[in-house]
Amino acid sequence: MPRMRRLGGRLKNLPVEGDKRVLLAAPRGYCAGVDRAVVAVEKALERYGAPVYVRKQIVHNVHVVQTLEKMGAIFVEEVEEVPEGANVVFSAHGVSPAVVQEAADRHLHAIDATCPLVTKVHREAVRFAKQDMEILLIGHTGHEEVEGTAGQAPELITIVNSPDDVDDLVVKDPDRLVWLSQTTLSVDETMETVRRLRERFPNLQDPPSDDICYATQNRQVAIKKIAPEADLVLVVGSTNSSNSVRLVEVALEYGAKAAYLVDFAEEVKQEWLEGVKTIGISSGASVPEVLVQELLDDLGEAGYEDVRAVVTAEEDLVFSLPKELRKDAAGNRDARALGGRVRA
């Protein structure tokens, strides 16, 4: 996703004690689920032509949404805004069965770009609901992913926003409880919530596997390694991106003297750099690498030319595109059936 380069020279090269350096987190940026969702919209536009409607933001990133809008995507809040019979893509965060049915009622051609790791949580919710288990869903009320998961079994799911919610929970049967979680949370806070839940409900069951996605965990691990050495941490990401916001919180919790979330390099303020020798940089799982490179360019002009990668994991996971997009209009298998964009 290219972006027009801005004029340089905005940040001044101010002297500091010692050598300036950047610690660049790896992995960072696009995860496999985001890659799949963005490519799905691009392929839908190629296959069906504009406009293609997208319910909610396909991923939580301003630049990605703006770029896709220029290509012909139209973002709507609900499927009722989509003309009957049109093409609509469900975002990476997933939807409830009620939304799927509403799309069917409007005869929409729906393409489901839900991240497969979110789909896994949906299936867990359905399975536990069939067993008449009460589900405590750790996540943020109002987030699209939480709405989609809660909608799988609304009569049996209670949302737990934070550890502080635990003391006020009322459940039907403390011996028939299981917890699930939003995939983009802070690992530490989620485990603290689970600990508090288990103190109140000793027979609480765990999900079959960890719900917090590999990319969220990997990016938090990298930030934890960088933060103690950083005078300043800059996370590239949007304010509605849960995993990006968590990276800032984790950086501060693990020792960064200051940390900020920015959508674009031009949002960095000169005063943030005063007296700063070491800058840590990462980006949320919905952020294209071009935005990080722009930030590095600007910081390089301010004297931060020594960039050192801090690698804590290697990622090579890719997901197949939605089945409707794996072949071209002629029925031939598409070369990008597995997404496959290069990620840092």
Image (spheres, rainbow, N blue to C red):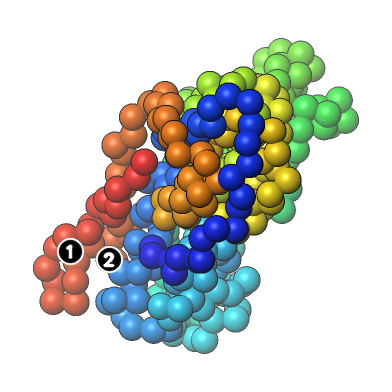
Q: Quadrant of residue 129?
A: top right
Q: Residue at x 22, y 59 (%)?
A: 336
In this view of the protein, which residue sits in the foreground, 141 or 156?
141
Residue 104 seen = no
Q: Residue at x 64, y 56 (%)?
A: 267
Label annotation for residue 325: 2
In the figure, is residue 245 to the left or right of 162?
left
Question: What amino acid type should be assigned to the residue bearing mark 2?
Answer: Leu
Question: What amino acid type should be assigned to the residue bearing mark 1?
Answer: Asp
Residue 309 in the image: state x and y as whole percent.
40, 30
Which residue, as the protein is rendered here, is positioned at the far right?
Answer: 168
Q: Residue at x 46, y 51 (%)?
A: 297
Q: Quadrant of residue 61?
A: bottom right
Q: Quadrant of residue 333?
A: bottom left
Provide the secondary structure element on which disc 2 rests.
Answer: helix
Residue 57 seen = yes
Q: Which residue is mark 1?
A: 334
Q: Residue at x 53, y 27 (%)?
A: 19
Quadrant of image for the N terminus:
bottom left
In this view of the protein, which residue sits in the foreground, 88 or 297?
297
Provide the secondary structure element on which disc 1 rests.
Answer: loop
Q: Are marks 1 and 2 in contact (CB under 8 Å)?
A: yes
In the image, residue 197 sits, relative to residue 114, either above or below, namely above
Label annotation for residue 210: none
Residue 148 in the image: state x and y as whole percent.
59, 53
In the figure, is residue 289 to the left or right of 322?
right
Cα distance between the residues tagged 1 and 2: 8 Å
Residue 125 in the image: state x and y as whole percent.
55, 40
Which residue, as the protein is rendered here, is positioned at the far front?
Answer: 15
Residue 319 in the image: state x and y as whole percent.
31, 47
In the image, residue 205 sits, relative to residue 181, either above or below, namely above
How many neighbours does mark 1 have within 10 angstroms: few (below 14), some (14-19), or many (20 or more)? Answer: some
